[in-house]
Amino acid sequence: MNEQLAKFLQFAKTPLAQRLAILAVCTLFLWALVLGDQGLYQLKKLSNIQAQLEEKKLMLTEFNADLRLQKNLLSKSENLEMAIRRELGYIYPGEVVYRAQNDGSTSSP
């Protein structure tokens, strides 16, 4: 016990410059731990980026599945022709297309 007390008293008698140096080293260590290139702040930032990328990956995977389904549906010629007619308005030469207009009014007899 006396030995520990003697060490404490010896530390207490160290010059102020040494105490400040120790304080500076501890401060620098804590700064590097929290704000450094591999610190806690950077770790949190990278964790958020990873979560965003995983969410985007999931969305793109679903979009890719939808595109594969469309590709499979359009591989049949009758489905392809129907899609071309509907989306591009394609008609055969000499073909007449009748479209009903919906003006929203009702007529009474």
Image (cartoon, rainbow, N blue to C red):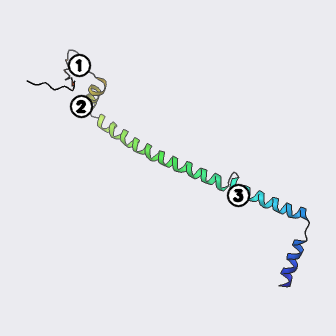
Tell me the crowding category of disc 2: few under 14, some 14 to 19, or many 20 or more residues within 10 angstroms, Cα based.
few
| Gap in angstroms between the C-alphas marked 2 and 3 | 65 Å
Disc sitting over residue 19 in the figure: none
The residue mark sitting in front, 2 or 3, is 3
Looking at the image, residue 100 lies above or below residue 3: above
Q: Position of residue 36 (x, y in %)?
A: 71, 52
Residue labelled with disc 2: 78
Residue at the top extreme?
A: 94
Instruction: Please tell me which residue is depicted at 70% across the width and 58% down the height of the picture.
Output: 33
| Gap in angstroms between the C-alphas marked 1 and 3 | 72 Å
Q: Position of residue 42 (x, y in %)?
A: 64, 51
User: Which quadrant holds residue 70?
Assistant: top left
Mark 2 residue type:
Glu
Looking at the image, residue 14 lies above or below residue 91: below
45, 108: nearer the viewer:
108
Looking at the image, residue 62 lies above or below residue 19: above
Give the SS element for disc 2: helix
Give the SS element for disc 1: loop
